[in-house]
Amino acid sequence: MTTDLSILKLIMDASLVVKIVMALLIIASLLSWTLIIVKSSTISSTQSSVTKFEERFWSGVSLNSLYEDLSQKVNRHGLERIFYDGFHEYKRALNVDPNSRLSVTDSVQRSMRVASSKEVDDLEQNLAFLATVGSTSPYVGLFGTVWGIMNSFISLGQMQQATLGVVAPGIAEALIATAIGLFAAIPAVIAYNRFSDKIDRLVVSYDNFREEFTALLERHASTQRKPA
């Protein structure tokens, strides 16, 4: 008599605890893949937006014209948001005290830092879930494997005569839990590291733009100062 060792059959015949472990890992894998797809699209869109905005910003377009165009947009992301918030604060501060260049640039810097922090926070949202799946899934799968093998040996001890054919299905179904755990963990770890690297690069772009834009506004403010 042959024993059915197909993966589906082994999963269906697994103990309740192992089935629960497998179900949790499959759900975690599906959620992580959904997050990977959404996050990949979001970060790619942000990178494209940053590139396009930098090209337009350094093309010589008027700052006021760029500000007016962005004021018409409902949703501003990335450098668009940082520029808009910074220039909005610049115009407000300049109207309040046009002779104080230092206070103007300080308030602009604070405004852009806040905008930059919000943008980075949006990009990093839910990344902790990928890190959690990547770090815990192998151990959850290993728990299911240990539990399944333990049950197999308990059953083995109750038999008068044990053969490999009797033990193999129980051990095989237990090892599937580890395989599912690795299947959930590996893509999550790869995606987390990749997204973290891309976000770090965007942070550098944001920081560089803030410094360059602040220097530009300092020169612009000096031309707007009223004589004492």
Image: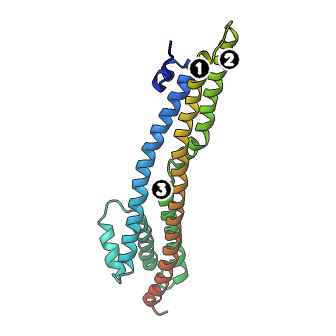
> Which-is-in-front pick, marks 3 and 2?
2
Which residue has dot 1 on it?
Answer: 170
Q: Nearer the viewer, residue 161 or 105?
A: 161
**Residue at position x 35%, y 73% in the image:** 67
**Does the residue at mark 1 contact the one at mark 2 (Cβ under 8 Å)?**
no
Q: Nearer the viewer, residue 195 or 153?
A: 153
Which residue has dot 3 on it?
Answer: 123
Q: Residue furthest bottom?
A: 227
Q: Dot 1 surroundings within 10 Å: few (below 14), some, or many (20 or more)? A: many
Mark linked to residue 153: 2
- Would you say 70 lies left or right of 37 here? left
> Which-is-in-front pick, marks 3 and 1?
1
Q: In x, y percent, where is residue 187?
A: 51, 46
The quarter of the displayed image where residue 58 is located: bottom left
Vertical arrangement, residue 178 with respect to residue 210, above or below = above
Mark 2 secondary-structure assignment:
helix
Mark 1 secondary-structure assignment:
helix
- Would you say 223 lies left or right of 100 here? left
Vertical arrangement, residue 71 with respect to residue 75, above or below = below
Q: Earlier in the sequence, mark 1 or mark 2?
A: 2
Q: Earlier in the sequence, mark 3 or mark 2?
A: 3
The amino acid sitting under disc 2 is Phe
**Residue at position x 61%, y 39% in the image:** 136
Q: In x, y percent, where is residue 182?
A: 56, 39
